[in-house]
Amino acid sequence: MKIIVGLGNPGIRYAGTRHNIGFSVIDELAEKYNIALDEKKHKAVFGKGLIEGEKVILAMPQTFMNLSGESVRELLDYYRCSTEDVIVIYDDIDLDIGKLRIREKGSAGGHNGMKNIIAHLGSQEFVRIRVGVGEKPKGMDLADYVLSRFAKEDLPLIRESCTKACEAVSVILAENAAAAMNRYNA
């Protein structure tokens, strides 16, 4: 079983913000693969289903971004999965809007949600899909930027990058992360 986690903040106030791109990808995966996100436990909203013949849990932690590791740890413990069974999807301000970067392991790169997940898992050995949300404008506060919504002209690129992230998840499950990296990395 794979646990696919999209990072974001709960509540309508944060819907559609740059920081919630992980939630957007989970929503698209759920729709594409007919997986109902109808369970609420382990500090997450989640659903179970199949993608590429693999049993999966699609999860959106409800702890707020900076405490996402609490939910991921609970899901791994309850379903007896290892860190190698985790795929985390999240925003990246160092990538242009519409670009993806997939890695099999690595540091948090300054992302507080990822720092918390790494701390709770005690490992950096899990696949991550970073979705570009564009660089923060000079002089703008980082929190204000990641909690802002995309400009109207950026929405087609964002929808395309969410679709590409869903395709990358499929490739990771059907083949492996290296195949997805070769196809989708910016």
Image: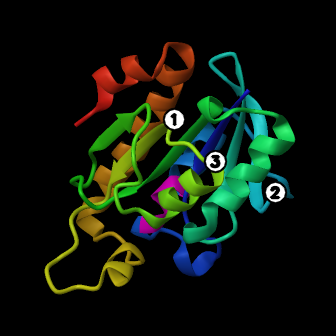
Sequence-wise first label, 2 or 1: 2
Give the position of the N terminus as an image quadrant: top right
Local crowd size for mark 2, using a 10 Å CA cut-off: few (<14), some (14–19), many (≥20): many
Whether 150 is drawn above or below 38: the answer is below
Q: Secondary structure at mark 2?
A: loop
Q: Is residue 29 visible?
A: yes
Q: Would you say 55 lies left or right of 65 here?
A: right
Q: Which mark is residue 121?
A: 3
Residue 116, position as x, y percentages in the image = 56, 61
Badge 2 vs badge 1, beta-carbon distance below 8 Å? no
Q: Would you say 89 lies left or right of 42 here?
A: left
Q: Would you say 8 lies left or right of 94 here?
A: right
* Extreme residue in the top direction: 175
Number of marks: 3
Quarter holding residue 52:
top right
Q: Residue at x 27, y 45 (%)?
A: 99
Q: Secondary structure at mark 1?
A: loop
Whether 115 is drawn above or below 170: the answer is below
Q: Residue at x 24, y 57 (%)?
A: 94
Q: Is residue 37 visible?
A: no
Q: Which mark is residue 42?
A: 2
Residue stretch in magenta: 19-23
Quarter holding residue 147:
bottom left
The CA span between labels 1 and 3 is 9 Å
The kind of secondary structure the magenta stretch mainly shows is helix
Whether 146 is drawn above or below 122: the answer is below
Q: In this view of the protein, which residue sits in the foreground, 47 or 42?
A: 42
Q: Mark 2 belongs to which amino acid?
A: His
What residue is shown with label 1? 125
Residue 55, position as x, y percentages in the image = 74, 25
Q: Mark 3 belongs to which amino acid?
A: Leu
Local crowd size for mark 3, using a 10 Å CA cut-off: few (<14), some (14–19), many (≥20): some
